[in-house]
Image (cartoon, grey):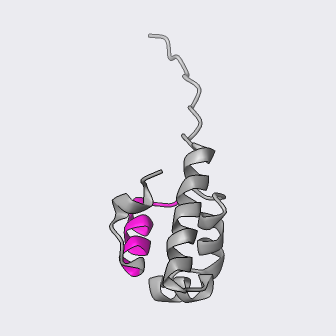
Amino acid sequence: MTLVLVPRQKQYRDEQVMLKLGQKIRDKRLQKGFSQAHLANLCNLELSQINRIELGKINTSVSHIFLIAKTLGVKPAELLEF
């Protein structure tokens, strides 16, 4: 029996989607009149995490998208419409 090693694939990251999601979150946050610090506090997330999400620097989790959407008073799908 021969063991064949298959290279591990890179994690999927679509920078354009991450940027668009971040911009949508930022737009909704500003419509509510929230600062990043206030949104982070309401979501119990770090300010730096909200900042990185809005800048499209991190591929955030689905649970965080739902949490942010709920906090902003919108449906998660609204944040993903772009």
The furthest residue to the front? 31
Instruction: Pick the residue in front: 35 or 12.
Output: 35
Left or right of residue 4, residue 48 in this image: right
Q: Main secondary structure of the magenta part?
A: helix
Left or right of residue 51, residue 65 in this image: left
x, y percent for residue 71: 40, 80
Instruction: Pick the residue in front: 76 or 32.
Output: 32
The quadrant in which residue 57 appears is bottom right
The quadrant in which residue 77 appears is bottom left
Q: Is residue 63 magenta?
A: yes
The quadrant in which residue 55 appears is bottom right
How many numbered discs, if any?
Answer: 0
Residue occupying the point 38% across, 61% down: 78
Left or right of residue 66, residue 21 in this image: right
Residue occupying the point 36% across, 63% down: 76
Instruction: Pick the residue in front: 61 or 76.
Output: 76
Specify the quadrant that holds the N terminus.
top left
x, y percent for residue 58: 61, 58
Above or below, 62 relative to 17: below
Q: Is residue 26 magenta?
A: no
x, y percent for residue 38: 55, 89
In the image, the segment drawn in magenta is 60-71
x, y percent for residue 60: 52, 60
Residue occupying the point 62% across, 46% down: 15
Above or below, 67 relative to 24: below
